[in-house]
Image (spheres, helix red, strand yellow):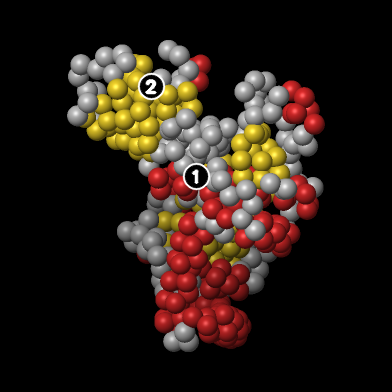
Amino acid sequence: MDATAKLYLNDSFRLEFEAGLQAVSTFDGKPSLVLDQSAFYGESGGQLGDRGTLTVGHVDLKIVDSQYGDGDVLHHLFEGEVPENLTSGAPVIGKVDFERRRDMMSQHTGQHMLSAALYKELGAETVSSRLGSRISTIDTDKKLTLEQVRRVAALVNDLIMEDLPIRPLYPDEEALAAMQLSRLPKVTKDIRILEIEGFDRTPCGGTHCSRTGQVGPVYVTTLEKCKSGTRVNFLCGKRVLDFLAARDETLALLGETLGCGAAGVAEAVTAMRKESKELSYNLGAVRAELNGYLSTQLHQAHPPMEPWTPVVVIRDKDDLKSLRALASALAGREDVVALVAGRDAKSGDWRVIVERGERADFDAGGWFRGPGAALGGRGGGRPNRAEGRFPADLDPTRLSLD
């Protein structure tokens, strides 16, 4: 099959076209149509493929993806059964889904601008980029901070407000050699350069806006560490508006829940954190007092034995932190081996801590591998201290150090 002519190269807003059918084919086991020319963009260069419809005769096929096969042959992947009696050369009417095309144009052009600005302002080169269906990413070769990248994004938004012209260029060898490009072309013929007037020139075969104002706002959401340096997660155009609308809705809901309105959420959360720290401190003091009382009572109820003294305690409503503290308090007496158990509030499983005093000759970790495992428990640790989890339906009276 011959390579598919790319009708979008000089006009990314071309959404409808006529073509001739080359073949009914498959791509990765899915049915596809191959045309002699198409305005559909096939997935490449980090940009997702177009969607839309192809009409062959009286049959409308829903195109769910566009992918390139060997030799620049574009496969239009469709849903449903393969139409009957299709012949080579049959006329086809194509229509690209405008919402997806418009979104991809915005993300791709915004990526070019952000990559160029990251290099110009911070010396950070783009190693790779990906324009996803929800979030877009740029991987750079430098460690960057969110403050740095958002400052760069602010410069990009200023350029967007200037509504600069964007155009594809097809330079000859001499003109190409004279250009200052942000990166070298990956192809050696039919080289296409995307020019953002007065700002950047980059080799690219994707779909783009014709003016920077069409990109819409650019917003950096988060940064991540990656092998090359920093991954920049960003949104462009309508995605920014949707993101901020969702955030506003969440903020309004929080304000309503806290009874302070959206504007008072930050102050209310700060006050709650302060109160939480105070309560945590007070709880710690109460827990220490309770554990001191319990350990004293249990020590009195368990006089020293030889070679060591077993103390088994079931506290089914205590949290894990309290159980650990009680086990440590009990093991503070050198002859004691303490087994303290309580229920996990979420799962209902039993959490068990085994800890020994300094003089007790007992292997806490070995207990989980032996008697504990026989009861269906999972866990382990060192000879002096170990902990694990047991099934919710375990009868806790079966927990024993004997």
Residue 130 sits in which quadrant? top right
Tag 1 near tag 2, CB within 8 Å: no
What numbered label is drawn on residue 35?
2
Taking the image as shown, residue 177 lies to the left or right of residue 103, namely right
Tell me where residue 53 appears, x and y as whole percent: 32, 35
**Disc 2 residue crowd, few under 14, some 14–19, many 20+, Cα 10 Å:** many
Q: Is residue 69 visible?
A: no
| Residue 301 or residue 318, whichever sits in front | 318
| Residue 238 or residue 364, whichever sits in front | 238
Q: Is residue 149 visible?
A: yes
Q: Three-letter amino acid code at disc 1?
A: Met
Residue at image coords 19%, 29%: 58
Taking the image as shown, residue 76 lies to the left or right of residue 228, namely left
Tell me where residue 227 appears, x and y as whole percent: 69, 41
Q: CA distance from mark 1 to mark 2?
A: 22 Å
Q: Which residue is mark 1?
A: 104
Residue 128 sits in which quadrant? top right
Residue at image coords 67%, 61%: 158
Q: Three-letter amino acid code at disc 2?
A: Leu
The N terminus - image quarter: top left
Taking the image as shown, residue 65 lies to the left or right of residue 211, namely left
